[in-house]
C-alpha cells in the first residue's frame, strides 16, 4: 500500500460552515486562471477568490476601479475550468451593483453562470437589500468591509480601517447587518486584529481576514504576493511563502499549512 492521499471531496457552503463550527481555519487565495486553479485545488486551498485585484496584478492598473463584469466573467470561467473541488468566490467589480439592485442581480447571475459558487460585494448597510435578494434567489453572498478598495477615492489611500471607537462600532454594525440580510460570509480587509476577532465572536457565519489578524474563521491573500511577485505595492500583511520552498506548489502548500496550524498571520502581519 502506498500512502497516497484520498482525493478531496467537493468543498460546499455546508463544508465551510462546518469548518467554521469546528474551528478549522478556511484557507483562501486569489486565483485568476485555470493552471493556478488546478495547482491551488491540489494543494488543498479551500476557496479560490477570483478577486477584482486582478485589475492590479493582471491588468497593471494602480487600483481595482477599471475592472469590468466581462473581465470577472472571463477569469471566473478560466478558474472554473481548472478547478475540481475548491469553492469559487468571485468579486462584483466597481460599477456593477452601485447603479441599482436590478443591475446588481443581473451581474451576479452572470458570474454564477460563469462558475462562481458565491459572490463578494464591498459594503455594509447600503448593500443589504441586494444581499437579501441574492440570498433569496439562491446566490450565496460574502460581504467585504473594512478597507474596501473600490472606495479608494473616498477613503483616500490604502489605509487601515476601524481604528477609532466610532470605526469599530461601524464595523460591528455593518457585519451584523450583512449577516441579518443573509450574507453567508463576511470578509475584513485591513482592520485591527482585536476588532476582527471581536466581531467574529458576535457572528455565526464564517469570517475571512486579510490584514485582519488571526481571530477570523479564515485567511485570504493575493496569490502573487505569497509568490513574491509584485507589479506595484507590497502590502505589510502579506508574506513571501517562496522562502523555504523549492517550487510554487511547495510555497502554496506551506501557506495552506501555516493557515491551518494558525502559524499565519503573526502580529507582524497584523494591525
Ligand atoms: N497584490 C495585491 N495585494 C493585495 O493585497 C491587494 C491587491 N493587490 N489589490 C487589491 C487590494 C488592495 N490592497 C492593498 C494594496 C496595497 C496595500 C499597501 O501597500 N499597504 C501598505 C500601506 C501603504 C500606504 O500606507 O500607502 C502596508 O504597509 O500594508 C494595502 C492593501 C489589498 N489588495
Ligand atoms: C484582497 C481580496 C480580499 C480581494 O477582494 C481581491 O483580491 O480582490
Ligand atoms: Mg476585491
Image (tube, rainbow, N blue to C red):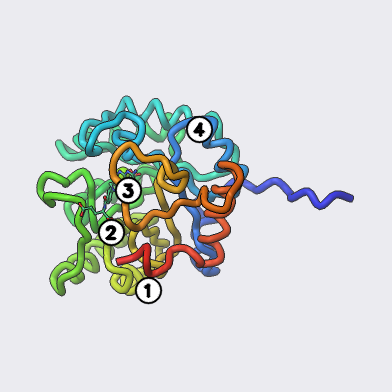
Label 2 crowding class (10 Å Cα cut-off): few <14, some 14-19, many 20+?
many
Q: Distance from label 2 to label 1 (Cα)?
A: 18 Å
Front in this rendered view, residue 265 or 128: 265
- Say if mark 1 contacts mark 4, CB within 8 Å: no
> Residue 207: x, y in percent?
39, 61
Dot in front, 4 or 3: 3
Q: Which mark is residue 80?
A: 4
Q: Determine if the C-beta at disc 4 is less than 8 A from ligand 2.
A: no
In-front residue for pair 68/174: 68
Q: Position of residue 203 (x, y in %)?
A: 36, 68
Q: Decide which of tag 3 and tag 2 comes sooner along the chain.
A: 2
Give the number of the mark in front: 3 or 1: 3
Residue behind label 2 places its C-beta within 8 angstroms of ligand 1 = yes
Question: CB of mark 3 within 8 Å of CB of mark 1?
Answer: no
Instruction: Name the residue carrying label 3.
Output: 234
In this view, 128 is above or below 231: below
Q: CA distance from mark 3 to mark 1?
A: 30 Å
Mark 2 and 1 residues: CB-CB less than 8 Å, in contact?
no
Q: Which residue is mark 1?
A: 201
Residue furthest to the right in view is 1
The residue under label 2 is: 190
- The mark that comes first in sequence, 4 or 2, is 4
Q: Is mark 3 within 8 Å of ligand 1?
A: yes
Helix, strand or loop under label 2 = loop
Amino acid at each position: 500500500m502506498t500512502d497516497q492521499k484520498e482525493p478531496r471531496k467537493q468543498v460546499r457552503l455546508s463544508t465551510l460552515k462546518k469548518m467554521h463550527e469546528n474551528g478549522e481555519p478556511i484557507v483562501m487565495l486569489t486565483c485568476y486562471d485555470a493552471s493556478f486553479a488546478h495547482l491551488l485545488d491540489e494543494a488543498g486551498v479551500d476557496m479560490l477568490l477570483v478577486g477584482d485585484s486582478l485589475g492590479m496584478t493582471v491588468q497593471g492598473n494602480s487600483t481595482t476601479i477599471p475592472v469590468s463584469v466581462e473581465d470577472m466573467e472571463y477569469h471566473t470561467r478560466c478558474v472554473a475550468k481548472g478547478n475540481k473541488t475548491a469553492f469559487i468566490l468571485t468579486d462584483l467589480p466597481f460599477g456593477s451593483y452601485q447603479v441599482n439592485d436590478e443591475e446588481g442581480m443581473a451581474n451576479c447571475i452572470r458570474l454564477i453562470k460563469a462558475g462562481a459558487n458565491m459572490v463578494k460585494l464591498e459594503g455594509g448597510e447600503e448593500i443589504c437589500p441586494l444581499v437579501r435578494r441574492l440570498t433569496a434567489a439562491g446566490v450565496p453572498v460574502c460581504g467585504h468591509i473594512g478597507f474596501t478598495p473600490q472606495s479608494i477615492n473616498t477613503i483616500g489611500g490604502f489605509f487601515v480601517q476601524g481604528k477609532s471607537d466610532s470605526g469599530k462600532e461601524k464595523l460591528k454594525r455593518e457585519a451584523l447587518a450583512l449577516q441579518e440580510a443573509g450574507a453567508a460570509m463576511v470578509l475584513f480587509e485591513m482592520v485591527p486584529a482585536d476588532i476582527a476577532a471581536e466581531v467574529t465572536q458576535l457572528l455565526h457565519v464564517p469570517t475571512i481576514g486579510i490584514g485582519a489578524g488571526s481571530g477570523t474563521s479564515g485567511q485570504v491573500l493575493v496569490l502573487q504576493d505569497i509568490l513574491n511577485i509584485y507589479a506595484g505595492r507590497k502590502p505589510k500583511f502579506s508574506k513571501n511563502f517562496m522562502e523555504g520552498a523549492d517550487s510554487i506548489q511547495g510555497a502554496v502548500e506551506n501557506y495552506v499549512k501555516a493557515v491551518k496550524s494558525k502559524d499565519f498571520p503573526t502580529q507582524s502581519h497584523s494591525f
